[in-house]
Amino acid sequence: MTHGRRNVLLVCALATMFALGVAVAIAGAATAADTDAKRIDRQVDRLIDSSGGIDITEIAPPPAVTADAWLVYDDTSNEPIATKDPSTQRPIASLAKLMTALVVVERMDLDEDVVTIPAAVNDLPADAAGIGLRAGEKWPARNLFRAMLVHSANDAALSLASSVGKGNIAAFVELMNARAKELGMSSSEFGSPTGLDAPGAANTSTPVDLVLLSETALTDDDIRSTVALTKITLTPPGTDRDPVTVTNRNPLLGSYDGVDGIKTGFTDAAGYMLLIHEVDPTTQGELVVATFSSSSEKTRVSDSRALLDWARPFRTRVTLVEGGEALGTIPVTGSGRTVEVFACDDVTASVRAGQRVRERIVVPRALTAPVHEGDEIGQFIVRVGSVDSKPTPVCSATSIPVESRLDRLQRHARDYRGAWRSGVDEIEGAWSSTKEQF
């Protein structure tokens, strides 16, 4: 299959996907007449065929939500999709615990370290989320880490920060702000490890900065696996207390297919916050959705759900080359023979509307015998937007053994005979031409 044909098929596949996506986005609207659908289809075709990227809000505008600020981010190709006021600093409540978690995993051994609960837990507000930690108790660091991220336990966050800061919470907060600077979170300021409203302890950020934070945090296995837990059971030290079971405060975890984290937040100053990471089970496309200051606990769920529903249909998974498809030939040095190569597996890509797809086959200019059928000799790389997908192996369809001395002599003899025959043919042709002149 040629590149041109693959591009045509890609356009067709995307056009089909977009038509479906737009239908989902406008379903139920009184104005979604057939003529409007045809107009949108024509617009989709035009945008796909254009040489540059497109703004998918031109195809179907994002839904109206109650959040004062939000950002939908394509975590597959590292691009924002749509936003509302993404750069204004606002209070972030317990979303600050995501930075607390990052600093903790970078400075503690969760499986080996034991944390002594500080007296500062007694100063937390009575209505602050927690697991009832008591000053002086000794808890495994991992249990506190899970309680902080799953249940947003403020006493757990404070205890971890105290341990890392060697009893100095302010020293831990300095580490939080230093890490934010390293990540390029230029519009963020951390004042506490909990995110609770308190005089002189502001925690502010933006949707843009929190996406930066989430991208780094989710590369850590401890953080990623913990924010995906739906509930945990913790056994307090000693024998006078029953095990504590707490559930994850993320309302979309387990109820929205593909959501695997990451964090909720609420204070009076911040309102209802939600930071979501989602992996589409069909396309494997990843989205991060940050919503700030939704109007209620219920609408922060519906806001995030609506934005996910809107963004997901604009991505599809396409097959660019089928496994086994011939890609060309490569010469084998000194043998006069060539090896046919093929894609060892299907070459697929997860593609969003308007993204450029570039294909690159990386193989040697020549091979050296022996070459065996099925040998992996190169890679087929697909770049979607600015990100390379996982390479697909390129394999040999031909076996070329190492030549024996006799094989080489016979090949050279054939070459000499061929050269001699060509010379004879040339002389005879010239002589025939000369005879015709007389």
Image (cartoon, rainbow, N blue to C red):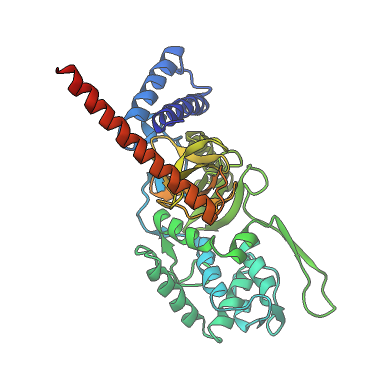
Of residues 35 and 117, the one nearer the viewer is 35
What residue is rendered at 66% in x and 76% in y?
141
Question: Can you tell which quarter of the image residue 422 is in?
Answer: top left
Of residues 15 and 423, the one nearer the viewer is 423
The spot of residue 204 in percent (x, y) is 42, 63
Q: Is residue 59 above or below residue 94?
A: above
Q: Is residue 294 left or right of residue 150?
A: left
Q: Is residue 322 above or below residue 413?
A: above
Q: Is residue 83 visible?
A: yes
Question: Can you tell which quarter of the image residue 206 is in?
Answer: bottom left
What residue is rendered at 36% in x and 35% in y?
421
The spot of residue 296 in percent (x, y) is 54, 47
Of residues 415 and 217, the one nearer the viewer is 415
- The quadrant of the rendering that contains the C terminus is top left
The spot of residue 154 in percent (x, y) is 60, 69
Of residues 424 and 323, the one nearer the viewer is 424
Q: Is residue 290 visible?
A: no
